[in-house]
Image: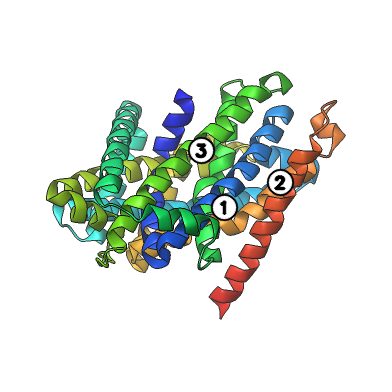
């Protein structure tokens, strides 16, 4: 349970905070339904991905290539694309955090954070210290968010009612939340960490299942608390700051002190995510060619710098954080379908017979996310 909690607190990055706040602002109590559906879809996706990779004892890209030569390269390309989107969003989150702490423009804050991220990456001890610092700050932020949720006095009855019977269903919100939790590289990265730790094979399935579900549930609880905190503010008709919606929630309820503390938490979570997302994304490529492995650190550094350059030219950090989750949500049905097909191949699964009920749940997630992705893409094109 401790590992699952650490995983959940690490997931409270800038995208998590911004997406939850913005969609609550837009949808009100109806966002409760989005949170509930996203948790169910997250569990269905993550259970299947982690189980198949644990049984086959293969990384996702290698498993895909074993299933169909060349498929692993396509999967890796999608994952890296999603990781790049996430990293641009993480850089944007760094800029927002610096802005809250110092008042500096988000572009300059992002450039400063890029330099710090590269320093953290190349100095291993500093990276470990910052990661531990972020986790403790994340815990404190959870406690502060609970305080804000209670203090803002959200309409609980309306929130419960619309969680079950919403007045509006926003497909983009569902895609974004699922993509921000288990889309792109995130689920695969968690499963790969289990493989690196030697947790694999049918004898470890109980632990794999527990880790997969616990992390999603804890993250869902945290998202619900932030949803209620924001709902308590917007339900009173108080307008949030569109330049940094989550920070404004903390300022409205907890004053300047809460606002500054939020900025520190957001920046520290974002800076570690910048390094983590770049490292994990490139890890999907390094098994393909010895040169990638040999120059891994330089490729990761380029990944971070390129993400920063894109943000500097594109701007609009809040929209970038929303779009990053949505893009990874679009990638998920393709990636999950590959895993589910692999689960049916005896040459990959050995003597293990994959549960029919898990296959059914997995394909339901693929169909639902595929349909939502189609609707969202059509809306974007229009």
* Image x and y of residue 124, in percent: 35, 28
Q: Quadrant of residue 174?
A: bottom right
Q: Taking 82 as reference, is 211 above or below it?
A: above
Could you tell whether 86 is left or right of 201 in the image?
left
| C-alpha distance separating marks 2 and 3 | 18 Å
Cβ atoms under marks 2 and 1 closer than 8 Å:
no
To which residue does mark 3 refer?
Answer: 217
Left or right, 41 with reference to 146:
right
Which residue position is annotated with label 1? 37
- Earlier along the polypeptide chain: callout 3 or callout 1? 1
- Callout 1 environment at 10 Å: few (<14), some (14 to 19), or many (20+)? some
Q: Secondary structure at mark 3?
A: helix
Label 2 SS: helix
Residue at horizontal 77 percent and vertical 40 percent from the top: 357
303 or 10: which is nearer to us? 10
Q: Is residue 116 visible?
A: no
Which mark lies nearer to you, 2 or 1? 1
Query: Mark on residue 166?
Result: none
Q: CA distance from mark 3 to mark 1?
A: 12 Å
Q: Which residue is mark 2?
A: 362
Q: Position of residue 108 (x, y in %)?
A: 23, 58
Picture quadrant of residue 261: top left
Q: Are marks 2 and 3 in contact (CB under 8 Å)?
A: no
User: At 18% across and 48% down in the image, what residue appears?
Assistant: 254
Q: Secondary structure at mark 1?
A: helix
> Label 2 to label 1, Cα distance in Å?
14 Å
Decide if residue 142 is in sight here.
yes
Q: Position of residue 209 (x, y in %)?
A: 63, 30
Residue beneath the point at 60% across and 59% down: 330
CB of mark 3 within 8 Å of CB of mark 1?
A: no
Q: Earlier in the sequence, mark 2 or mark 3?
A: 3
């Amino acid at each position: 349970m401790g590992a699952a909690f650490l995983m959940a607190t690490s997931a409270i990055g800038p995208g998590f905070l911004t997406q939850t706040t913005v969609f609550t602002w837009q949808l009100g109590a109806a966002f409760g339904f989005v949170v509930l559906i996203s948790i169910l879809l997250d569990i269905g996706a993550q259970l299947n991905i982690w189980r198949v990779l644990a049984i086959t004892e293969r990384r996702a890209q290698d498993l895909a290539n074993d299933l169909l030569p060349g498929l692993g390269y396509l999967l890796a390309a999608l994952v890296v694309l999603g990781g790049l989107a996430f990293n641009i969003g993480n850089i944007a989150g760094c800029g927002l955090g610096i802005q809250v702490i110092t008042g500096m423009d988000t572009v300059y804050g992002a450039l400063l954070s890029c330099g710090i991220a590269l320093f953290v990456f190349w100095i291993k001890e500093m990276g470990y210290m910052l990661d531990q610092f972020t986790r403790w700050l994340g815990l404190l932020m959870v406690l502060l968010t609970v305080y804000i949720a209670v203090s803002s006095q959200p309409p609980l009855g309306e929130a419960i009612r619309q969680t079950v019977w919403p007045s509006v269903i926003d497909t983009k919100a569902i895609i974004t939340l699922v993509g921000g939790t288990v889309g792109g590289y995130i689920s695969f990265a968690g499963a790969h960490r289990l493989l690196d730790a030697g947790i694999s094979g049918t004898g470890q399935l109980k632990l794999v299942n527990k880790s997969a579900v616990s992390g999603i549930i804890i993250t869902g609880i945290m998202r619900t608390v932030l949803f209620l905190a924001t709902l308590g503010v917007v339900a009173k008709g108080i307008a949030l700051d569109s330049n940094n919606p989550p920070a404004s929630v903390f300022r409205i309820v907890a004053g300047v002190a809460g606002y500054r503390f939020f900025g520190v938490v957001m920046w520290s979570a974002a800076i570690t995510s910048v390094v983590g997302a770049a490292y994990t994304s490139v890890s999907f490529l390094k098994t393909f060619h010895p040169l990638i492995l040999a120059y891994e650190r330089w490729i990761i550094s380029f990944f971070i710098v390129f993400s920063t350059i894109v943000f500097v030219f594109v701007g609009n950090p809040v929209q970038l954080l929303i779009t990053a989750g949505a893009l990874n949500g679009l990638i998920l049905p393709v990636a999950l379908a590959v895993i589910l097909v692999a689960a049916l191949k005896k040459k990959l699964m050995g003597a293990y017979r994959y549960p029919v009920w898990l296959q059914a749940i997995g394909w339901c997630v693929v169909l639902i996310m595929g349909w939502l992705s189609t609707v969202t893409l059509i809306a974007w094109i229009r």
